[in-house]
Image (cartoon, rainbow, N blue to C red):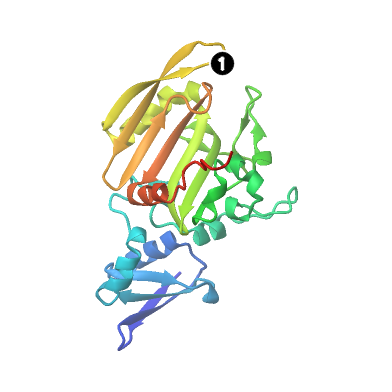
Protein backbone atom coordinates (compact mmCIF):
# COMPACT_ATOMS: atom_id res chain seq x y z
CA UNK A 1 0.00 0.00 0.00
CA UNK A 2 1.40 3.38 -0.96
CA UNK A 3 0.27 6.95 -1.52
CA UNK A 4 1.78 9.67 -3.68
CA UNK A 5 0.54 13.17 -4.41
CA UNK A 6 1.22 16.50 -6.03
CA UNK A 7 -0.57 19.83 -6.33
CA UNK A 8 -1.55 21.41 -9.62
CA UNK A 9 -1.71 25.14 -10.27
CA UNK A 10 -5.48 24.99 -9.83
CA UNK A 11 -5.03 23.86 -6.22
CA UNK A 12 -6.09 20.25 -6.70
CA UNK A 13 -4.22 17.37 -5.14
CA UNK A 14 -4.03 14.29 -7.36
CA UNK A 15 -3.35 11.24 -5.23
CA UNK A 16 -2.63 7.73 -6.41
CA UNK A 17 -3.38 5.08 -3.80
CA UNK A 18 -2.57 1.46 -4.60
CA UNK A 19 -4.39 -1.50 -3.12
CA UNK A 20 -7.97 -0.19 -3.41
CA UNK A 21 -10.86 0.09 -3.63
CA UNK A 22 -11.37 1.78 -0.26
CA UNK A 23 -14.34 3.11 1.65
CA UNK A 24 -14.64 6.79 2.61
CA UNK A 25 -13.40 6.14 6.14
CA UNK A 26 -10.46 4.05 4.88
CA UNK A 27 -9.47 6.83 2.48
CA UNK A 28 -9.49 9.37 5.30
CA UNK A 29 -7.31 7.06 7.39
CA UNK A 30 -4.85 6.73 4.52
CA UNK A 31 -4.73 10.51 4.22
CA UNK A 32 -3.97 10.77 7.92
CA UNK A 33 -1.25 8.11 7.82
CA UNK A 34 0.38 9.85 4.85
CA UNK A 35 0.36 13.13 6.82
CA UNK A 36 -1.50 14.90 4.04
CA UNK A 37 -3.12 18.10 5.28
CA UNK A 38 -6.50 17.47 6.85
CA UNK A 39 -8.02 20.85 5.86
CA UNK A 40 -9.14 19.37 2.56
CA UNK A 41 -12.47 18.29 1.18
CA UNK A 42 -12.14 14.72 -0.07
CA UNK A 43 -14.01 12.94 -2.82
CA UNK A 44 -13.37 9.79 -4.73
CA UNK A 45 -14.71 8.36 -7.96
CA UNK A 46 -16.00 4.91 -8.83
CA UNK A 47 -14.78 5.47 -12.39
CA UNK A 48 -11.29 4.64 -11.19
CA UNK A 49 -12.48 1.97 -8.75
CA UNK A 50 -11.74 4.36 -5.87
CA UNK A 51 -7.99 4.17 -6.50
CA UNK A 52 -7.72 7.90 -7.14
CA UNK A 53 -9.04 10.61 -4.88
CA UNK A 54 -9.06 14.34 -5.56
CA UNK A 55 -8.96 16.97 -2.84
CA UNK A 56 -9.31 20.70 -3.18
CA UNK A 57 -8.50 23.15 -0.41
CA UNK A 58 -11.58 23.95 1.64
CA UNK A 59 -11.07 27.71 1.29
CA UNK A 60 -11.72 27.27 -2.43
CA UNK A 61 -14.87 25.24 -1.83
CA UNK A 62 -16.58 27.22 0.92
CA UNK A 63 -19.75 27.79 -1.06
CA UNK A 64 -20.04 24.11 -1.85
CA UNK A 65 -19.38 23.26 1.79
CA UNK A 66 -22.14 25.66 2.87
CA UNK A 67 -24.64 24.08 0.48
CA UNK A 68 -23.67 20.65 1.79
CA UNK A 69 -23.26 21.66 5.43
CA UNK A 70 -25.26 18.71 6.67
CA UNK A 71 -22.67 16.23 5.38
CA UNK A 72 -19.67 17.96 6.92
CA UNK A 73 -17.60 15.82 9.30
CA UNK A 74 -19.26 15.70 12.70
CA UNK A 75 -17.32 16.76 15.82
CA UNK A 76 -17.18 14.03 18.45
CA UNK A 77 -17.13 11.31 15.82
CA UNK A 78 -16.61 8.66 18.51
CA UNK A 79 -20.18 9.45 19.65
CA UNK A 80 -21.77 9.67 16.21
CA UNK A 81 -20.52 6.27 15.09
CA UNK A 82 -21.64 2.65 15.30
CA UNK A 83 -19.50 -0.25 14.09
CA UNK A 84 -17.68 1.87 11.54
CA UNK A 85 -20.71 3.74 10.16
CA UNK A 86 -20.38 7.48 10.90
CA UNK A 87 -23.49 9.62 11.09
CA UNK A 88 -23.31 12.68 8.87
CA UNK A 89 -20.48 11.14 6.85
CA UNK A 90 -21.29 7.60 5.69
CA UNK A 91 -23.04 7.72 2.33
CA UNK A 92 -25.68 5.30 1.10
CA UNK A 93 -23.51 4.60 -1.94
CA UNK A 94 -20.49 3.73 0.18
CA UNK A 95 -22.63 1.70 2.62
CA UNK A 96 -24.16 -0.29 -0.25
CA UNK A 97 -20.75 -0.99 -1.77
CA UNK A 98 -19.25 -2.08 1.54
CA UNK A 99 -22.10 -4.43 2.52
CA UNK A 100 -22.94 -5.82 -0.91
CA UNK A 101 -23.49 -9.59 -0.95
CA UNK A 102 -25.27 -11.81 -3.44
CA UNK A 103 -27.47 -14.48 -1.86
CA UNK A 104 -28.44 -17.76 -3.47
CA UNK A 105 -31.64 -17.80 -1.37
CA UNK A 106 -32.89 -14.45 -2.69
CA UNK A 107 -33.09 -12.63 -6.00
CA UNK A 108 -31.96 -9.33 -4.49
CA UNK A 109 -28.52 -8.57 -3.00
CA UNK A 110 -27.86 -7.00 0.38
CA UNK A 111 -28.11 -4.48 1.84
CA UNK A 112 -31.90 -4.47 1.85
CA UNK A 113 -33.07 -0.93 0.97
CA UNK A 114 -36.55 0.55 1.22
CA UNK A 115 -36.08 2.68 -1.91
CA UNK A 116 -35.72 -0.55 -3.90
CA UNK A 117 -38.61 -2.39 -2.21
CA UNK A 118 -42.30 -2.68 -2.99
CA UNK A 119 -44.09 0.12 -1.03
CA UNK A 120 -46.24 -2.44 0.77
CA UNK A 121 -43.13 -4.07 2.24
CA UNK A 122 -41.28 -1.04 3.62
CA UNK A 123 -42.91 -1.34 7.05
CA UNK A 124 -40.84 -4.50 7.58
CA UNK A 125 -37.78 -2.22 7.72
CA UNK A 126 -39.51 0.23 10.09
CA UNK A 127 -40.12 2.75 7.27
CA UNK A 128 -43.19 4.55 5.94
CA UNK A 129 -44.43 4.88 2.39
CA UNK A 130 -43.70 8.65 2.21
CA UNK A 131 -39.99 8.11 2.88
CA UNK A 132 -39.00 7.44 -0.74
CA UNK A 133 -40.48 10.64 -2.12
CA UNK A 134 -38.87 12.57 0.76
CA UNK A 135 -35.39 11.22 0.01
CA UNK A 136 -35.27 8.93 3.05
CA UNK A 137 -34.05 5.34 2.95
CA UNK A 138 -33.98 2.66 5.63
CA UNK A 139 -31.52 -0.15 5.04
CA UNK A 140 -30.30 -3.29 6.75
CA UNK A 141 -27.20 -5.30 5.97
CA UNK A 142 -29.06 -8.62 5.98
CA UNK A 143 -32.42 -10.10 5.11
CA UNK A 144 -34.63 -11.40 7.94
CA UNK A 145 -34.41 -14.98 6.68
CA UNK A 146 -30.67 -14.93 7.38
CA UNK A 147 -31.38 -14.96 11.12
CA UNK A 148 -30.04 -18.08 12.81
CA UNK A 149 -31.29 -20.12 15.74
CA UNK A 150 -29.74 -19.31 19.10
CA UNK A 151 -28.29 -22.24 20.99
CA UNK A 152 -30.24 -21.64 24.17
CA UNK A 153 -33.74 -20.62 23.07
CA UNK A 154 -36.01 -20.40 20.05
CA UNK A 155 -35.51 -16.70 19.33
CA UNK A 156 -34.35 -15.74 15.87
CA UNK A 157 -31.45 -13.33 16.08
CA UNK A 158 -30.16 -10.86 13.51
CA UNK A 159 -27.16 -12.44 11.78
CA UNK A 160 -25.05 -11.77 8.71
CA UNK A 161 -23.51 -14.71 6.87
CA UNK A 162 -23.83 -16.84 10.00
CA UNK A 163 -22.31 -14.24 12.36
CA UNK A 164 -24.61 -12.93 15.08
CA UNK A 165 -24.58 -9.12 15.30
CA UNK A 166 -24.37 -7.60 18.79
CA UNK A 167 -24.48 -4.34 20.72
CA UNK A 168 -22.47 -4.25 23.95
CA UNK A 169 -22.42 -8.05 23.82
CA UNK A 170 -26.21 -8.40 23.51
CA UNK A 171 -27.49 -10.23 20.45
CA UNK A 172 -29.40 -7.98 18.07
CA UNK A 173 -32.84 -8.85 16.79
CA UNK A 174 -32.51 -6.22 14.06
CA UNK A 175 -30.27 -3.33 13.03
CA UNK A 176 -31.45 -0.47 10.79
CA UNK A 177 -29.51 2.36 9.16
CA UNK A 178 -31.41 5.48 8.10
CA UNK A 179 -30.25 7.81 5.30
CA UNK A 180 -31.52 11.22 4.20
CA UNK A 181 -30.42 12.57 0.83
CA UNK A 182 -27.94 9.70 0.74
CA UNK A 183 -26.26 10.50 4.08
CA UNK A 184 -26.50 8.39 7.25
CA UNK A 185 -28.50 10.19 9.95
CA UNK A 186 -29.59 7.43 12.33
CA UNK A 187 -28.77 3.92 13.47
CA UNK A 188 -31.15 1.94 15.62
CA UNK A 189 -31.32 -1.62 16.81
CA UNK A 190 -33.42 -4.02 18.86
CA UNK A 191 -32.31 -6.58 21.44
CA UNK A 192 -33.80 -8.73 24.21
CA UNK A 193 -34.98 -6.56 27.13
CA UNK A 194 -33.47 -9.12 29.50
CA UNK A 195 -30.08 -7.77 28.34
CA UNK A 196 -30.98 -4.15 29.11
CA UNK A 197 -28.99 -3.86 32.35
CA UNK A 198 -25.72 -5.03 30.78
CA UNK A 199 -26.21 -2.83 27.71
CA UNK A 200 -27.01 0.13 29.98
CA UNK A 201 -23.74 -0.37 31.87
CA UNK A 202 -21.80 -0.42 28.62
CA UNK A 203 -23.51 2.74 27.36
CA UNK A 204 -22.80 4.53 30.66
CA UNK A 205 -19.14 3.53 30.38
CA UNK A 206 -18.89 4.82 26.81
CA UNK A 207 -21.09 7.92 26.97
CA UNK A 208 -20.81 8.95 30.63
CA UNK A 209 -23.58 10.46 32.74
CA UNK A 210 -26.84 10.76 30.77
CA UNK A 211 -28.51 14.05 29.99
CA UNK A 212 -31.87 12.64 31.01
CA UNK A 213 -33.25 9.48 32.61
CA UNK A 214 -36.93 8.74 33.14
CA UNK A 215 -39.44 5.93 33.55
CA UNK A 216 -42.15 5.27 30.98
CA UNK A 217 -45.27 3.17 31.49
CA UNK A 218 -45.94 0.25 29.13
CA UNK A 219 -49.14 -1.78 29.23
CA UNK A 220 -49.59 -5.40 28.26
CA UNK A 221 -52.69 -6.60 26.42
CA UNK A 222 -54.20 -8.06 29.60
CA UNK A 223 -53.89 -4.73 31.42
CA UNK A 224 -50.73 -5.10 33.51
CA UNK A 225 -48.54 -1.99 33.50
CA UNK A 226 -44.74 -2.08 33.54
CA UNK A 227 -42.38 0.84 33.97
CA UNK A 228 -39.42 0.91 31.61
CA UNK A 229 -36.33 3.09 31.76
CA UNK A 230 -35.56 5.62 29.02
CA UNK A 231 -32.07 7.15 28.98
CA UNK A 232 -30.90 10.06 26.81
CA UNK A 233 -27.40 11.37 26.08
CA UNK A 234 -27.29 14.64 24.15
CA UNK A 235 -23.93 15.81 22.82
CA UNK A 236 -25.07 18.80 20.78
CA UNK A 237 -24.35 17.18 17.42
CA UNK A 238 -25.68 13.69 18.14
CA UNK A 239 -28.16 12.13 20.54
CA UNK A 240 -28.12 8.58 21.93
CA UNK A 241 -31.30 6.95 23.25
CA UNK A 242 -31.65 3.70 25.17
CA UNK A 243 -35.10 2.26 25.94
CA UNK A 244 -35.75 -0.68 28.22
CA UNK A 245 -38.96 -1.55 26.32
CA UNK A 246 -39.65 -1.04 22.64
CA UNK A 247 -42.48 -2.38 20.44
CA UNK A 248 -43.10 -5.10 23.05
CA UNK A 249 -41.95 -5.88 26.59
CA UNK A 250 -39.54 -8.56 25.39
CA UNK A 251 -37.60 -6.08 23.27
CA UNK A 252 -35.35 -3.12 24.13
CA UNK A 253 -33.88 -0.66 21.65
CA UNK A 254 -31.16 1.92 21.14
CA UNK A 255 -31.00 4.88 18.74
CA UNK A 256 -28.03 7.01 17.65
CA UNK A 257 -29.22 10.19 15.91
CA UNK A 258 -27.50 13.01 14.06
CA UNK A 259 -29.38 16.00 15.49
CA UNK A 260 -29.36 18.36 12.49
CA UNK A 261 -30.26 15.64 10.00
CA UNK A 262 -32.94 14.25 12.33
CA UNK A 263 -34.52 17.71 12.45
CA UNK A 264 -34.43 17.82 8.66
CA UNK A 265 -36.10 14.38 8.59
CA UNK A 266 -38.86 15.62 10.92
CA UNK A 267 -39.47 18.66 8.72
CA UNK A 268 -40.28 16.40 5.76
CA UNK A 269 -42.96 14.38 7.56
CA UNK A 270 -46.23 15.11 5.72
CA UNK A 271 -48.28 14.25 8.82
CA UNK A 272 -51.56 12.33 8.89
CA UNK A 273 -53.76 12.42 5.79
CA UNK A 274 -56.84 13.92 7.39
CA UNK A 275 -58.74 13.90 4.08
CA UNK A 276 -58.34 10.13 3.63
CA UNK A 277 -61.79 9.04 4.91
Location of residue 163 (image quadrant): top right
Residue 181 position in % (x across, y down): 46, 59
Q: Against 242, is 44 above or below?
A: below
| Image spot of residue 136 (x, y percent) | 50, 53
Q: Residue at 46% of width from left, 19% of height from top?
A: 218
Q: Residue at x 62, y 55 (%)?
A: 116
- The quadrant in which residue 180 appears is bottom left
Q: From the viewer's perspective, is 92 left or right of 35?
A: right
Direction bottom: furthest residue: 9
Point out residue 105 in the picture as x, y percentages from the top left corner: 75, 47
Q: Residues within 10 Å of mark 1 (few under 14, many from 20)?
A: few
Question: Which of 118 and 22 lies nearest the eye of the viewer?
Answer: 118
Q: Is residue 126 visible?
A: yes
Kind of element beneath mark 1 = loop
Residue 35 appears anywhere in the view: no
Q: Is residue 14 above or below residue 210?
A: below
- Front residue of 106/166: it is 106
Residue nearer the viewer, 133 or 34: 133
Which residue does the numbered mark 1 point to in the structure image?
221
Residue 63 picture location, percent across and down:
29, 72
| Number of numbered discs visible in the structure rendering | 1
Name the residue rendered at 38%, 47% in the picture: 262
Whether residue 167 sits left or right of residue 66 in the image: it is right
Q: Quadrant of the C terminus?
A: top right
Query: Above or below — where is 204 with respect to 181?
Result: above
Residue at position x 47%, y 53% in the image = 179
Amino acid sequence: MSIEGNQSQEGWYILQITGGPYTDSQLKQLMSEAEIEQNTLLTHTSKTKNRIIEAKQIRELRELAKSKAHIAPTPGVEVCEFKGEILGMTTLEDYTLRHHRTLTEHNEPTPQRTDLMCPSAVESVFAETWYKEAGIVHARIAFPFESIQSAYDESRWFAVAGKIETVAGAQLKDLIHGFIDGVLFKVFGYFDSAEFSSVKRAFLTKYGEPTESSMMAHQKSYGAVFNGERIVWNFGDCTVLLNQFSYDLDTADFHILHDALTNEFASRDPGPQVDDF
